[in-house]
Amino acid sequence: MTASNAAPEDDPQVYPASVEIFYNESKAAREAMDQLLLRYRTNTTAVLALATGAATFFGFAASPKGSFFIASLVAYGVATLVAVAIYWPSSWRVNVAYDVEDRLSKSPPKRPTALRWDLARGHQQAIAQSIKLVEGWHGQASKFRALLLATSLVVIFAGVNSYLGPQSPTTIPPTRVIIEKEQPK
């Protein structure tokens, strides 16, 4: 055990039942953070599908393609880039038991409580890393909010474009041709 993250094996203040509770709670909290990160990615797929559907639906509309349509396409491009940023691979899954086999083969702990303590501390460190991935300006939460905003703009701009389309004529009025009969001379 290292002194930085583990209680001494002979410390009378660390009770096995308390360590067990700490371990279980740490593991449950870590699983919740891992699920949160997965939900961001899953929900990104749904929101991007909505943006794609809106862009496609309004893109095929018979309305003229004006500046609001261009703004809608730009917002769709932003939504796509944000989705890529959310899906970009990052190391957020931490194996807290990576060295347990080595440690057990060299010198097994005198009490299983020490091992549980180390694993619980590993889960706590993984939780802290996951929280850093979610929070902040470049965090998954901010990226997801930007995705929602860009998707909303796709729908709004495309909708305004299709609304303004019927306000202006889309066809040229027919040319009126008058054929006069030539009078005999």
Image (cartoon, rainbow, N blue to C red):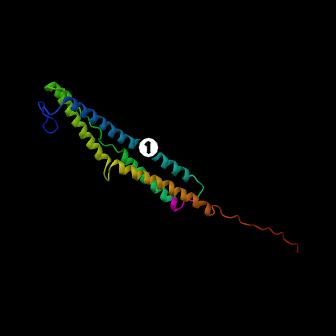
Judged left or right of residue 159, residue 19 is left
Judged left or right of residue 102, residue 42 is right
Total residue callouts: 1
Q: Amino acid at mark 1?
A: Thr
- The image shows residue 33 at horizontal and vertical percentages of 32, 40
Q: For the residue carrying disc 1, how many other residues have a C-alpha within 10 Å: few (<14), some (14-19), or many (20+)?
A: some
Camera-side residue of 23 and 18: 18
**Residue, x 27% and y 32% (percent of image)?**
24
Residue pushed farthest left?
A: 10
**Quadrant of the image containing the N terminus:** top left
Tell me where the magenta segment starts and ends, as one range: 64-68
Q: Is residue 109 above or below residue 41?
A: above
**Residue, x 71% and y 66% (percent of image)?**
175
Residue pushed farthest right?
A: 185
- The image shows residue 119 at horizontal and vertical percentages of 22, 33
Camera-side residue of 98 and 128: 128
**Residue, x 19% and y 26% (percent of image)?**
112
Return the residue at label 1.
45
Judged left or right of residue 103, residue 128 is right
Quadrant housing residue 170: bottom right
Give the secondary structure at mark 1: helix
Q: Main secondary structure of the magenta part?
A: loop
**Quadrant of the image containing the C terminus:** bottom right
Judged left or right of residue 65, residue 145 is left
Asked if residue 23 is among those painted magenta in the image, a careful observer would answer no
**Residue, x 24% and y 39% (percent of image)?**
124
- The image shows residue 83 at horizontal and vertical percentages of 40, 48
Residue pushed farthest bottom?
A: 185
Camera-side residue of 57 and 131: 131
Camera-side residue of 62 and 45: 45
